Amino acid sequence: MTKSYSHNSFLYGVVYYPEQWPEERWDLDLSRIAATGMNVVRMGEGAWNVWEPEEDHYEFDLFDRALALCRRHGLKAIMGTPTYTPPAWLTERYPEVLRVRYDGTPLVHGSRRHYNYTSPVYRRKCQAITEALARHYCQHPAVIGWQIDNELNCHVDVSFADSDHEAFRDWCRSRYGTLEALNNTWGTAFWSQAYTAWEQIWLPRPTATYQNPGWLLDFYRFTSDMTISFGRMQREIVKRIAPQQFVTHNAFQSMTNVDLGKFVEEAVDFVSYDSYPEFKVCDPTLPINFRDRWESRFLSRMRGLSPKFMVLEQQSGPSGQIGGILNGNPDYLHPTPKPGQMRLWCWNSIANGADGLLFFRWRSLPYGAEAHWNGLLYHDERNTWRLEEAKRLGDEIKRVESKLLSSRCVSQAAILYDFDNDSHALIERATGRHRESSELGVFQSLAEKHICADLVPFSSIRNGDKLGNYEIVFFPHAHILTVEDVRALQAYVEQGGTIVFGSWSGYRDRKHWCYDAPGKAFYEEFIGARVNDFTVVVPGEKSGMRFADGQMECDAPIFNEVLAPSHTETVVLASYTADYYAGQPAATLHRNGKGRVVHFGSFFTAKNVGALLNALHIKDPLASWAEIPSELQAMVRSNGSEKFCFLLNFTSRPQRVRFKEPMWELLEERKLDKDAELPPYGVILVGC
């Protein structure tokens, strides 16, 4: 079931924490926020010690006064449940609530996210504070919704406390029923690992060497289920008490070890996101011309979960954290967004489906580990150019608000991902560590051809969601694949769709067992080919492929499969150009019904995906009305009768667009000539 965000206005605002500022400043702050064109603030998720200064003693006065001021200035509020920052009295009185590292070290008070999801005591305390807040604010006229917790699984995504081990045993009993079934699934006949009593079952602990992969896969599944259960517990409380208020969560790019599709289905009304492009700007492993543009991939993942969503934290200035020296956490400081860049990032979030956006944060805090995490205002408040940029953005949003609220993104492609396969990539690191860059190759090549791609959890397809609106679907990492999984894709292909599988697909079942030849027949029948041989590409050596239409040679990195067509309807799209398998098939295409199934025998890069798209005759969908350079990102939204296209310049150079006819630009309400220029970090919105 698709869960999408909807509100009667575009929510534009800022994160504001009244407990961190003298009360005499609140009125001026909130009046300035409103004067900037904003209509919403987020608050409360870090204030458990304010809500409950002593055990079972709740105080609401501080936030009641802050919310009264919000109402005076016409601001709505999204409240946060404060469960990611338990107070000192709680962790000192109940040390069993603490998260424990793999080596057995407990994480103590003095930072954040130091609790575990399975502690019965902690769950009771979280239930109590969530219920108290929901009851107090369920009818408050300023409160429109809730953010549960904050960036689940950020910093640390696993825990090994006593309650975690106990919960894992219970999870295994529920999943397998008998030790015989568990031993069979985990393959404990290897290395004499068989278990004869449930008390012998533990979460992974330090061992002499490599650990059982089936055990590890269930460990990741268990971790996800406990995270989802923790979120679901809070959502159920809020919806029981305040059904008219929405419940969401601010997923972050570091929200790992969570089955996101299942999380959204069970734990929230819709997903939200925290967008910090500077993390990618500062990532030297990414292509320099695609770094902050890579943030669109995470936004596309949110859109694949909720077609409309919110950004609850949008980067507003240079960011950084300090104080990690004793823990081994590296301090960092990001550069200041260049003039226009902050606005660009905001419009990119909106273009990708966000109908609500809040900056983090209003003002830079003078103390704490995030004193260098700057807001719209610096500490001394004299430099206000980013605040002016935010005001300009607010004015632009008001001009096009009705078009945004009535429209959705139009996507021509999908990139499938799967929790078990993501977990496998953590277990099998030799090639698994390259999986993200392989997906980047797919996403980048599609984006440079102005093909909008949704990142879609495969679980939603197994549960009945359709792929029919997509011209092409990529499944870059389908190492774990079953007959039932292929059946879920069959109708899409037979009705005319094109699906592309990456290398090393269809090797294992959901037990994590490798297929024998009869077991893998379902996949070979689907792709019309089989793998004759495979090898890794040795570091320092290069492998290449060339497509049959004579295109330039492309890299074929990391892992190579030598393919052999097994059906007369199967054609060879590309062949290898190096090593003992030079001239042998590297990519095949099998016609199935009205559609096509491609197996690509190497890891993806932007260049080899571009060559593949050309071989498949997948064209730029916007070429009929404009010549748009690949450097510009293009995002289309439609309300059914009209289409609107965002063009975003992520480069530091002007970029020219040639329209087939003069266009009307909606953000600044001006006419554009056929030849239009976007300045560095510029954004335009036109009808198309």
Image: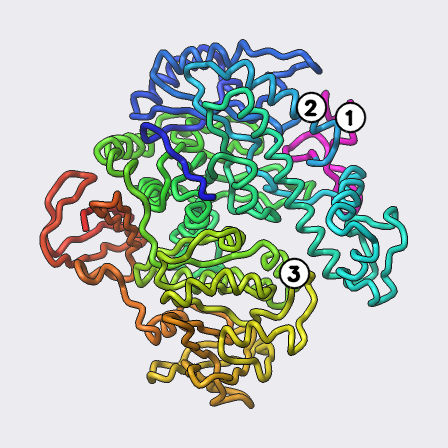
Q: Which residue is mark 2?
A: 125
Query: Of label 1 and label 3, which has the lower sequence position?
Result: 1
The overriding secondary structure of the stretch rendered in magenta is: loop
Contact check, label 2 and label 1, Cβ < 8 Å: yes
Q: Residue at x 18, y 59 (%)?
A: 626
Q: Which residue is mark 3?
A: 510
Residue 338 makes an appearance in the image: no
Q: Secondary structure at mark 2?
A: helix
Residue 510 makes an appearance in the image: yes
The spot of residue 207 in percent (x, y) is 82, 57
Q: Residue at x 69, y 56 (%)?
A: 217
Q: Which residue is mark 1?
A: 94
Q: Is residue 619 above or below residue 74?
A: below
Of badges 2 and 3, the one in the foreground is 3
Contact check, label 2 and label 3, Cβ < 8 Å: no
The spot of residue 532 in percent (x, y) is 58, 84
Query: Of label 2 and label 3, which has the lower sequence position?
Result: 2
